[in-house]
Image: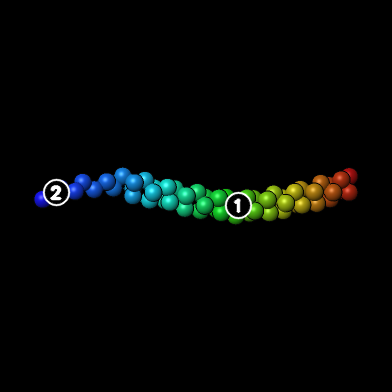
Amino acid sequence: MERKILDDGGQISAEMILLIGAMLIIVIIAGGYILGITKSIAGNITSVVDTARDTAINRM
């Protein structure tokens, strides 16, 4: 009777590539969402600072 040696190295390697790819996609999507929030906050802060500056200049 022959002994069969199973090679699971290829299976593990393929699973790791898929796992890393899925994590990379999640990070890219989350990064895009966070970038959008950051731009929105920066726009709001710029608007508030511009309004405060204009008000302060008008009071002088």
Which residue sits at x=24%, y=48%? 6
Whether residue 44 is visible to the viewer of this picture, yes or no, is yes
Q: Is 2 left, or right, of 27 in this rendering?
A: left
Q: Position of residue 53 (x, y in %)?
A: 81, 46
Q: Which residue is mark 2?
A: 2
Q: Decide which of 51, 4 is in the foreground and name it.
A: 4
Which residue occupies the foreground of this view, 43 or 18? 18
Q: Position of residue 43 (x, y in %)?
A: 72, 51
Left or right of residue 13: residue 27: right
Q: Name the mark nearer the viewer: 1 or 2.
A: 2
**Please, which residue is most extreme toward the front here?**
1
Q: Which residue is mark 1?
A: 32
- Residue located at (80% from left, 51% from top): 51
Could you say where residue 9 lies in the image, as x and y percent from the top left?
A: 31, 44
Residue 2 percent location from the top left of the image: 14, 48
33 vs 52, left or right, is left
Amino acid found under the numbered disc labelled 1: Gly
- Tell me which amino acid carries mark 2: Glu
**Image quadrant where one finds the C terminus:** top right
**x 72%, y 53%: residue:** 44
Specify whether 53 is left or right of 6.
Answer: right
